[in-house]
Amino acid sequence: MKAKTIITLLAVLAFGTVSAEEGVQWERLNDDQKKVLSIYSEGWEQLDPQQQKRLAVGAERWTGMSGQQRKAAQARFGHWRNLSDTQRDKIRHRYSQFREMSPDDQRRIKENFRRFQEMSPERRQKLRERFRDLSPEQRKRLQDRMSDRRPKPSGARD
């Protein structure tokens, strides 16, 4: 069932760091959550408590989405499913690094990504090509220059 897989992925990606001592009892799920997670109904109690929490949260999120949002989520999941294990691991690692950044750095990255998305496809392609054509030394200098622009953590000294 596509919904089960999508819910699981959304929950793992969005709430992968949830820690739980206790799971979620099936009876405590609302009717919408139960409907989305019906495939788990018989084996719910055997699931890991963290997985129960992630699935419950993911099902709640799924039921709150509009039809258009669900289609977009399904498209993203389809893309994710087509990635190799190596590509997925790389994305997970980068996401972990992002989560460890300061809120200011996260905001800066989100803003840069938003600006990149607003560029014309031609402009984005030119930027990709320019970056791809850089030598390793040029890439390192660019990374160093960009890290110099990052805000310093509070209390840090030069």
Image: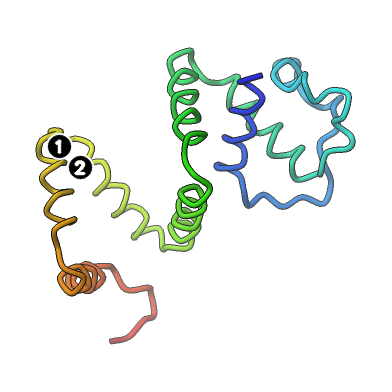
Q: Secondary structure at mark 2?
A: helix
Going by the image, does 87 lie left or right of 60?
A: left
Quarter of the rendering containing residue 133 = bottom left
Q: Of tags 2 and 1, which is closer to the observer?
A: 1
- At x 73% / y 22%, what residue is drawn? 37
Element class at badge 1:
loop
Q: Is residue 140 left or right of residue 53?
A: left
Residue 104 to residue 34: above or below: below
Classify the position of the N terminus by image quarter.
Answer: top right
Evaluate if marks 2 and 1 touch, with contact meaning CB atoms under 8 Å apart: yes
Residue situated in front as seen by the camera: 107 or 36: 36
Vertical side of 4 occupied by 99: above or below: below
- Rendered position, 117 above or below 95: above
Residue 4: quarter of image: top right
Whether residue 86 sits left or right of residue 24 in the image: it is left
Residue 115 - label: 2
Which residue appears farthest toward the top when viewing the image?
67
Q: Amino acid at mark 2?
A: Arg
How far from the left and from the top, in percent, is residue 61? 59, 27
* Image disc number at residue 119: 1
Specify the color scheme.
rainbow
- Residue visible at 10% across and 40% down? 123
Name the residue located 64 percent from the left edge and 26 percent from the top edge. 60
How crowded pointer 1 is (Cα within 10 Å; few <14, some 14-19, many 20+) is rated as: few
Which amino acid type corresponds to the residue marked 1 in the rendered image? Met
Measured as percent of width and height from the top left, residue 30 is found at 75, 20
Q: Nearer the viewer, residue 9 or 19?
A: 9
x, y (%) of residue 144? 22, 74
Residue count near mark 2 (Cα–Cα under 10 Å), binned few <14, some 14–19, many ≥20: few
